[in-house]
Image (cartoon, coloured by chain):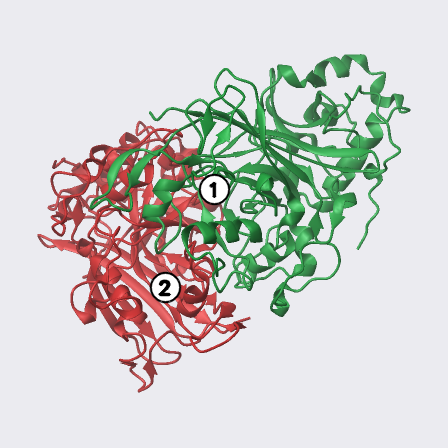
Chain colours: A green, B red
Amino acid sequence: MSIIIEANDSSLKSWINIPDQSDFPIQNIPFGILRHPEFGAVAATRIGDTVIDLCSLARNHYLKDTGADPEVFHRPVLNDFISLGQPVWRAVRNRLSWLFRHDNPALRDNLLLIREAMFDVRDVEMLMPVKVGDYTDFYSSLEHATNVGIMFRDAVNPLLPNWRHIPVGYHGRSSSIVVSGNSIHRPKGQTRGDKDESPVFGPSRQVDFELEMAFITGKQTKLGDSVSVIDAEDHIFGLVLFNDLSARDIQRWEYVPLGPFLAKNFGSVISPWVVTLDALEPFRTVGPVQDPHPLPYLQFEGKKSYDINLEVALIPDGAEEITISRSNFRYMYWNMAQQLAHQTVNGCNINVGDLYGSGTISGPLPESYGSMLELAWKGTKPLRMTDGTERVFINDNDTIILRGFAIKDGIRIGFGEAVTKILPAK
Amino acid sequence: MSIIIEANDSSLKSWINIPDQSDFPIQNIPFGILRHPEFGAVAATRIGDTVIDLCSLARNHYLKDTGADPEVFHRPVLNDFISLGQPVWRAVRNRLSWLFRHDNPALRDNLLLIREAMFDVRDVEMLMPVKVGDYTDFYSSLEHATNVGIMFRDAVNPLLPNWRHIPVGYHGRSSSIVVSGNSIHRPKGQTRGDKDESPVFGPSRQVDFELEMAFITGKQTKLGDSVSVIDAEDHIFGLVLFNDLSARDIQRWEYVPLGPFLAKNFGSVISPWVVTLDALEPFRTVGPVQDPHPLPYLQFEGKKSYDINLEVALIPDGAEEITISRSNFRYMYWNMAQQLAHQTVNGCNINVGDLYGSGTISGPLPESYGSMLELAWKGTKPLRMTDGTERVFINDNDTIILRGFAIKDGIRIGFGEAVTKILPAK
């Protein structure tokens, strides 16, 4: 399975300064969209705390012969670049790795271009990296599904009969996915308490985060075609952190029989840097044992899970940050290849830029649960904040931060942050 | 409520020949996308059996001062034209009405342009009229929800507690929506019979149609904003017929707890001509009484339903067509304004080109049911075809046709057809 990608060489150093504990060493080279002060939206990468405008690099011939025309980097989203295909992403990432290695003067000594094309991350705004055509959210963490089942259905048989056979998923709303840094208003909607005769209308009282990752597809298929588990990863461009904000009280009243709707479409937040599957290659690992054995179209060989540490922090308004969850992407019962094979097994077509959320990623320990619902166990175990207040769900003006990073052999490949503040209802 | 739109004048005649019973008199003037033999995809309208290339009309200055630049009609989809806003759609539709009225020689006598810009509908291919960003499917027919409830849950209390309070809906897959004329392969997937221990994988044995209409939004909103019931119709560009193909056996196994997924995303079919809400203005009617009274954000005044006759026909391979259902859009319990107000009440943003399916439109009588599931009542009442065969669901190589038209004061405004053939599983 293992492939050699030059840019992943762990011995590489860069001539760009990289702070300790940075998510963005020269081995990462993620892709995003930068609001350039002069050119508008351009494709960018990041090394350490430096954001690099790829359009300027390309126009100055530093990316020639990679298969990417300079103008493909001068677009509001990465979709057209991604559509060029895996050989082009790889060539561009390898070229960037070569350009920024410590012993290469080609770009390092072009001070004029460095001044024009490189920015401090604190000075720039990052935009949505892709135009999301369709967005699917899976429900692939055994621990999360089990916790929800215990709380709301049956403590003895918490899993529904289909769960161990199907990577259960549903379609979500693309329009309300925003990039890190955007605040979201608390949603209003219908709720009905267990003892109420009729529903009432008002702001949700149970706004929650969901700690997820999401993958972005990089290759189109035709309606009627399927993607096999074996081929699935070749259809994946990269991953982001994904906060699937949820209003639990709205969800409980609306979701039977057709699933979550307004409980989930008032805003979802992704991190701005798409970390390529190539960059995550060294962090492959085995996933949980699947019992019973899935149907043949979901069977796989090799390591299809990824060892990525995940954290959730909460900042009460005006107080200090506190980490409230530590989980790992490898806890997912169903892996990405299985999810994509399932999504397409009926002939459903995929497009470049589709987003596939993992579902809440809860681990086996209470401190690894991926939602407030589970961490505070349905309101029974309030979380104490740094300012002495307690939380069972998210309060107005709370800020939620998702973080993710993989570490191996001294190399840390990270995702940065997906940050959002919950504002009062409009 | 009533507004005056010049193009709706029922006394108008056209210099284009209009066959009896045509869905496309000069009072309709729908919008679609034509594959032009020379120019590629262009916006078009239709009068009688004549398809008219709007790009050529605009380039020859026949649409000047409407607010639409000729190049906006030279796009693969209508989204950019629709984005110009309601005053522009109205101005273009009124101008087309004026250009084609029987006593106007301005275009009628320009034989060179007529030869270049007008086509017989039998000679052309129509493409997807819009790029669908997000697609929502509602579940707004009381009769359909009741029938499904009786068959699968509880014959005494067939409706779930939320149904009369919420226009229940869920997000669907945009990528697999195709235009009339496309065939769809029978989907494969997991199913599990009531007596089976484990699921099996194979072609669905219960492929069904769903008779729906869908509206297309014409005005964007920002995340966090809501559209009121009063303003909702100003955000609607027009309507199409919508066949929400469904695999009942896949749905039954997968849909708990997050709703339909692979049962619905293998292909959905729309009619090619978007009939504007303006053209449907004369057909407003009162809808069903809503009891209990909905919450204030769903309350409305005036006529928000539309009297549109709907039909479903089935053509077995090599046999004659048979009409298997006759329903009406006015049977919908929740109207479009309520659906859009509900969709956005939590701040969910909408974009131009979003598609909102009504849900299966079943009427009160068995012959007005909008799906095979209901018509054949869960397989217990097979439908006899013209060739003597029977159907309880759709067979391979069956063709399904949806039709819709409104009639009043001798004017018939129709939608044409949404046609699809179900091919064997791949």
Give the answer, above or below, for where A230 lies relative to A237. below
Label 1, secondary structure: give it: loop
Report the residue marked by disc 2.
Answer: B419
Q: Can you say which quadrant of the picture contains the N terminus of chain A?
A: bottom right
The picture places residue B403, in percent across and down from the top left corner, at 27, 61
Q: Position of residue B325 (x, y in %)?
A: 23, 69
Could you say whether the residue bearing mark 2 is in a helix, strand or loop? strand
Q: Is residue A206 above or below residue B251?
A: above
Can you say whether B98 is above or below B187 in the image? Answer: above
Chain containing mark 1: A
Left or right of A58, for residue B393: left
Q: Amino acid at mark 2?
A: Val
Q: Which mark is residue A150?
A: none
* Residue A127 rendering spot, x and y as whole percentages: 56, 27
Quadrant assignment, res B177: bottom left
Q: Depth check: A32 or B217 in front?
A: A32
**What is the number of the mark on residue A377?**
1
Q: Amino acid at mark 1?
A: Trp
Does any portion of residue B370 appear in the rendered image?
Answer: no
Circle 1 residues within 10 Å: few <14, some 14–19, many ≥20: some
A369 and B230: which is toward the camera: A369
**Residue at x 20% of width, y 43% of height:** B101
Based on the displayed image, in which of its 4 quarters is residue A392 positioned? top left
Give the residue displayed 29% in from the left and 41% down from the top: A191
Place of residue B118 in the rendered image (x, y in percent of width and height, measured from the top left): 35, 50
Residue at 42 percent across and 38 percent down: it is A379
Which chain is disc 2 placed on? B
Q: Is residue A405 visible to the viewer in this orientation of the structure? A: yes
